């Protein structure tokens, strides 16, 4: 079983040495250093996600990827995710194709609806159009991905008739995934376009998502399409020991979840509830290299994964701890995962 191992970040606003939140510009520069380290250590993928809120520094992921494209050599670079509902698919295709040129063919894109709504009023979209915006824009992007002349018409923009969108890619293909949460409609739609999926497992055990992935594979079969890759995006943190990893991650995790919970009306996140999330059956992959490797390998076998993406940044977790997490993930977790999968 072959499994790619990657990393994701949203550019979470971390604290500096004085304990105060860093300026977003400094966080962006830290993300560049983290991506460069992931490349030097031989990881397969580095993804950056789009947000438009004070918790995160990255609002233009393709610009960050362009910087990484010219300062890395081998690692694949992608968005995790691009909020397609509030984007122009033509401009998305143009920008990611440009990153593909700068990286010499290493660019990818993951599109999704996003888990926050700030981009809708920011860019002048109505929330009541949430579903139709994503549906139509994914359809237009799928047309653009063919590389053929596009004749497209919908309700969310003027008709498009164009022979070619530049610069395009030298390989005549742009690896495109659909980021999905837990809705059956999302995976069936991705299958109908013949696009691979990345499942965001950010709450609950991975086994809860097995029926969703089975549905995706059945939809591919019914559409007479070949089997396609399935990836998982989940949060986590690696340190030398389980105790150290939990100690480093618990504070930022609880603080972030309570801040988000106040917006969404959730019950407070206590340390006991948080430890359940960080444990063996929770969504987070937190622990020593051996603990994290075994949990990733178990998830990969259970769901038949092609890629696992660890979202390694969390709230005010500092840069030094994120760098050490990346080092351990690349040098100890990745080879151990492959060893475990080879033996199964």
Image: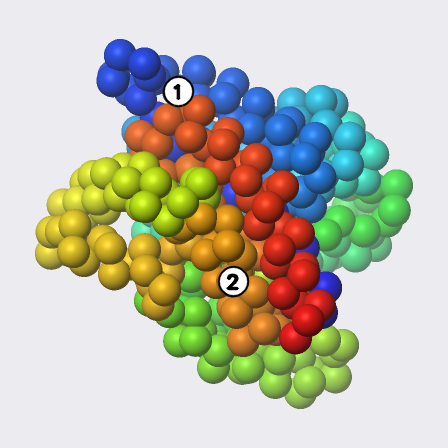
The correct choice, above or below, for 269 with respect to 50 in the image is below
Residue at left 44%, top 24%?
Answer: 320
Going by the image, does 314 lie left or right of 325?
left
Q: Do we see residue 256 in this rendering? A: no
The correct choice, above or below, for 139 with respect to 164 in the image is below
Q: Which mark is residue 24?
A: 1
Going by the image, does 188 lie left or right of 175?
left
**Quarter of the image where the C terminus is located:** bottom right
Which residue position is annotated with label 2? 294
Instruction: Measuring from the top left, give residue 301's x and y in whole percent.
Output: 59, 73
Q: Quadrant of residue 32?
A: top right
Instruction: Measuring from the top left, give residue 272's x and y in whole percent.
Output: 16, 56
Instruction: Measuring from the top left, give residue 304's x and y in whole percent.
Output: 61, 73
Residue at left 43%, top 69%?
Answer: 206
Going by the image, does 16 lie left or right of 200?
left
Residue sitting farthest toward the top: 18
């Amino acid at each position: 079983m072959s499994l790619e191992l990657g990393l994701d970040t949203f550019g979470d606003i971390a604290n500096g040495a004085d304990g105060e939140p860093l300026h977003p510009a400094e966080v962006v520069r830290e993300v560049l250093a983290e991506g460069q380290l992931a490349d030097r250590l031989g990881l397969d993928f580095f993804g950056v996600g789009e947000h438009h809120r004070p918790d995160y520094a990255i609002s233009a992921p393709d610009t960050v990827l362009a910087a990484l494209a010219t300062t890395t050599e081998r690692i694949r670079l992608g968005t995790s995710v691009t909020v397609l509902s509030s984007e122009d698919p033509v401009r998305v295709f143009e920008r990611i194709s440009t990153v593909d040129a700068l990286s010499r063919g290493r660019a990818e894109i993951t599109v999704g609806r996003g888990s926050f709504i700030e981009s809708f009023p920011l860019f002048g979209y109505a929330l009541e159009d949430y579903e139709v915006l994503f549906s139509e824009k994914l359809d237009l992007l799928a047309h653009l991905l063919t590389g053929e002349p596009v004749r497209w018409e919908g309700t969310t923009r003027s008709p498009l008739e164009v022979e070619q969108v530049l610069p395009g890619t030298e390989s005549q293909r742009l690896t495109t995934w659909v980021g999905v949460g837990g809705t059956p409609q999302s995976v069936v739609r991705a299958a109908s376009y013949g696009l691979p999926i990345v499942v965001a497992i950010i709450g609950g055990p991975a086994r809860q998502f097995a029926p969703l992935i089975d549905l995706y594979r059945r939809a591919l079969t019914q559409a007479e399409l070949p089997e396609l890759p399935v990836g998982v995006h989940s949060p986590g943190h690696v340190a030398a020991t389980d105790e150290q990893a939990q100690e480093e991650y618990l504070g930022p995790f609880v603080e972030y979840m309570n801040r988000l919970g106040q917006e969404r009306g959730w019950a407070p996140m206590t340390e006991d509830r948080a430890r359940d999330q960080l444990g063996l059956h929770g969504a987070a992959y937190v622990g020593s290299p051996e603990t994290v490797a075994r949990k990733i390998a178990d998830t990969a076998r259970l769901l038949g994964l092609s890629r696992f993406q660890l979202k390694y940044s969390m709230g005010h977790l500092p840069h030094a701890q994120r760098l050490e997490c990346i080092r351990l993930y690349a040098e100890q977790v990745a080879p151990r995962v492959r060893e475990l999968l080879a033996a199964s």
